[in-house]
Image (cartoon, rainbow, N blue to C red):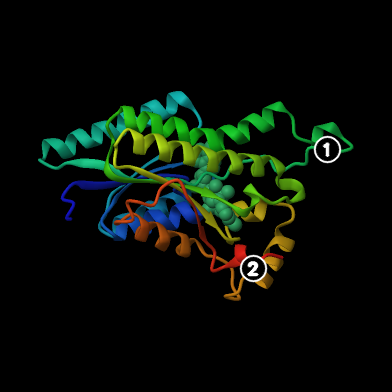
Amino acid sequence: MTDDRERWALILGASSGMGEATGLALARAGYRIFGIHLDFRAAVAHVDEVKAAIEAAGSEALFINMNAADDEKRTSALAALRERFERSKAEGRDPYVRVVMHSLAFGSLVPFLADDPKAAVDRKKMEMTQDVMANSLVYWVQDLWHGGFLGRGSRIFAMTSEGSSRVVPSYGVVSSAKAALESHVRQLAMELARLDTGVTANAIRAGVTLTPALMKIPEHDAIIDAAVRRNPTGRMTTPQDVADAIVALSDGAGFISGEVIGVDGGEFITGS
Ligand SMILES: NC(=O)c1ccc[n+]([C@@H]2O[C@H](COP(=O)([O-])OP(=O)(O)OC[C@H]3O[C@@H](n4cnc5c(N)ncnc54)[C@H](O)[C@@H]3O)[C@@H](O)[C@H]2O)c1
């Protein structure tokens, strides 16, 4: 069935890694990109390059530099999107958010137990990580749904990792956020189906991928070595692998919902 609506992709974490690659791939597939990111100083120059690449693909890049877990900022970001949609509607087009991608990397990489309690997790670090890396998905989807931004055929993707069910010494806080994120995806998938929205929600479990977020994990060298050893393809996952999967799953695939979909060349099934 053809879709003559104006397709937008909301990418949470659009300036780097998987979000950057997916935004560009969706732009090439005809989507306009609404990108949310959090960047400071030198990193801001890269954001301009990402936007330029999207525009060079013949698309549009509406980007906002903000904390995606801030309620007021989320409200004003969606007001900006509504204003942009009104312009399209005035020109006779029918815009909707076809793809939502949650690709935020912003967590405390500390153990639960450390000799110096300041080096261990505390309530603030735990709650901030859960809020950005898991709960923010629910609040964005609530506002998108209430605001009428989603339409039949919309697809929600949330980036998870093998850490949702495995342990790494410094990754405990993020692990718990990934487990919560997968649970949020299942709940959203069920509620969206019961409401007959025609919207699906899935988690994408990427293999170990070279990005700034990976390099922040203290054990990154050992994680990379293990990924290359385990991955039956003999290489690591790339942001482009994730982007290709999301582009493919965004067209059709309307009865796949509530799943954790591996995009890793078989790394997960190979075990240790
Ligand atoms: N890199 C890996 O090996 C790997 C594997 C599996 C899953 N993942 C997951 O994929 C997602 C993306 O990771 P990546 O490796 O592409 O990371 P990345 O560091 O390359 O990109 C992270 C993005 O999130 C944005 N961001 C971070 N905190 C934010 C906030 N509070 N508000 C708004 N934007 C914010 C950054 O600006 C950036 O655009 C994460 O959820 C990560 O856990 C990564």
Can residue 221 be spotted in the picture?
yes
> Is 127 in front, or is 156?
156
Q: In the rendered image of this protein, does residue 164 appear above or below residue 124?
A: below
Viewed as shown, does residue 223 lie left or right of 44?
right
> Is 262 in front, or is 53?
262
Q: Quadrant of residue 2?
A: bottom left
Q: In the rendered image of this protein, does residue 261 appear above or below residue 231?
A: above
Whether pointer 2 and pointer 1 mark residues with C-beta atoms closer than 8 Å, the reply is no
Q: Which mark is residue 206?
A: none
Viewed as shown, does residue 167 lie left or right of 237?
right
Q: Residue sitting at 79 percent across and 36 percent down?
A: 120
Q: Amino acid at mark 2?
A: Thr
> Is 112 in front, or is 93?
112
Residue 75 at what x, y percent from top left? Answer: 38, 26
Q: Secondary structure at mark 2?
A: helix
Which is nearer the N-term, disc 2 or disc 1? Answer: 1
What quarter of the picture does the C terminus occupy? bottom right
Q: Residue sitting at 54 percent across and 57 percent down?
A: 206
Residue 87 at what x, y percent from top left? Answer: 18, 36
Q: Which residue is mark 1?
A: 113
Residue that sits furthest to the left in the current view: 92
Q: Residue sitting at 54 percent across and 54 percent down?
A: 205
Q: How many marks?
A: 2
What quarter of the picture does the N terminus occupy? bottom left
Can residue 40 be spotted in the picture?
no
Residue 134 at what x, y percent from top left? Answer: 55, 37
Q: Secondary structure at mark 1?
A: loop
Residue 29 at what x, y percent from top left? Answer: 29, 59
Q: Amino acid at mark 1?
A: Leu
Q: Which residue is mark 2?
A: 270
